[in-house]
């Protein structure tokens, strides 16, 4: 006969760690939607696709993105 003491304890995730994990996921999602993680995504892509070439610095990447965004026609009509 198995008693309650002999049974393996059930593991419950702590509420605090669940909240922290949820907030981190929310923060990552917010950064992705706003484009704030663009440089980190660029570094990942560059390392995977162009392993021999040095990546742009954060400043050079930002300047290149600004030039790309604002060097074309940006009007609706």
Image: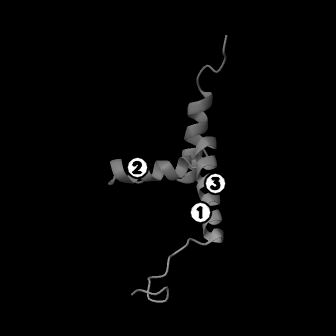
Cβ atoms under marks 1 and 2 closer than 8 Å: no
Residue 70 position, x and y percent, is 62, 29
In this view, 43 is above or below 7: above
Q: Which quadrant of the view contains residue 16?
A: bottom right
Q: Is residue 45 visible?
A: yes
In this view, 64 is above or below 20: above
Pick whichever of labels 2 and 3 is earlier in the sequence: 3
Residue 44 position, x and y percent, is 43, 53
Residue 49 position, x and y percent, is 34, 47
- Of all residues, the one furthest to the front in this rendering is 1
Q: Residue at x 64, y 21 (%)?
A: 74
Q: Secondary structure at mark 1?
A: helix
CA gap, disc 1 and disc 3: 10 Å
Q: Nearer the viewer, residue 72 or 10?
A: 10
Q: Nearer the viewer, mark 1 or mark 3?
A: 1
Pick whichever of labels 1 and 2 is earlier in the sequence: 1
CA gap, disc 1 and disc 2: 28 Å
Residue 46 - label: 2
Q: Nearer the viewer, mark 1 or mark 2?
A: 1
Q: Residues within 10 Å of mark 2 (few under 14, many from 20)?
A: some
Q: Find disc 1 in the rendering and name its residue.
A: 21
Q: Secondary structure at mark 3?
A: helix
Q: Quadrant of the C terminus?
A: top right
Cβ atoms under marks 2 and 3 closer than 8 Å: no
Q: Nearer the viewer, residue 24 or 11?
A: 11
């Amino acid at each position: 006969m198995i008693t309650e003491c002999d049974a393996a304890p059930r593991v419950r995730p702590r509420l605090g760690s669940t909240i922290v994990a949820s907030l981190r996921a929310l923060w990552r999602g917010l950064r992705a939607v706003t484009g704030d993680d663009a440089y980190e995504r660029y570094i990942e892509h560059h390392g995977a696709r162009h392993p021999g070439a040095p990546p742009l610095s954060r400043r050079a990447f930002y300047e290149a993105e600004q030039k790309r965004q604002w060097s074309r026609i940006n009007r609706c009509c």
